Image (tube, helix red, strand yellow):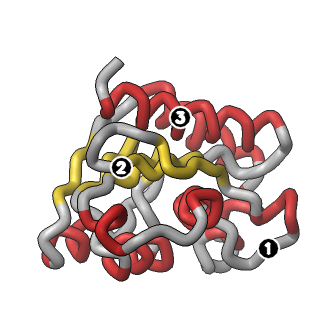
Amino acid sequence: MSESDIGFKAAFDEAQKGHVEGGIPIGAAFVSADGKVLGSGHNMRVQAGSATLHAEISALENAGRLPASLYHGATMYTTLSPCDMCTGACVMYKVKRVVIGENKNFLGGEEYLKSKGIEVVVLHNKELQTLMKKFIKEHPEEWYEDIGEENK
């Protein structure tokens, strides 16, 4: 299994786990340059009552403290385009690449990532698009709170 397959599968599995737990179905996996999953996680804002525990932040937290060199060659796999907070974390740690499952339901900081020299790959995964669209329709209050907006 290639690094991209491992990273995307880990992020996808985390999104499914969050969905089963009744949370926002977004997952992420932080993968080293040599293809090792350093940490994975899912959005835990609902489950943990957290203001900041988005999937990418959860993946970084679960990776623990690492030498800067591990961050610099790593890839962040995320099932949804990253918000400004998660984009900032990727920029701060100088990840090499961000692979995004889908960006139709939410378009985050992709242009900012690119402006900082980070490679951005969007997979346009239909299953994730459908999952997020359904979640947003069924739970608009959680969704808008998650992205820091008023419920429309």
Whether residue 133 is visible to the viewer of this picture, yes or no, is: yes
Residue marked by disc 3: 10
Residue marked by disc 2: 32
**Circle nearer the N terminus (3, 2):** 3
**Which numbered disc, 1 or 3, marks the residue closer to the eye?**
3
The spot of residue 69 in percent (x, y) is 30, 68
Q: Dot 3 surroundings within 10 Å: few (below 14), some, or many (20 or more)? A: many
Vertically, is 152 above or below 143?
A: below
Q: Secondary structure at mark 2?
A: loop
Whether residue 104 is visible to the viewer of this picture, yes or no, is: no
The spot of residue 142 in percent (x, y) is 76, 62
At x 37% / y 61%, what residue is drawn? Answer: 107
Give the CA separation, mark 3 to mark 2: 13 Å
At x 36% / y 47%, what residue is drawn? Answer: 100
| Label drawn at residue 137 | none
In-front residue for pair 111/42? 42
Q: Quadrant of the C terminus?
A: bottom right
**Which numbered disc, 3 or 2, marks the residue closer to the eye?**
2
Give the CA separation, mark 2 to mark 1: 27 Å
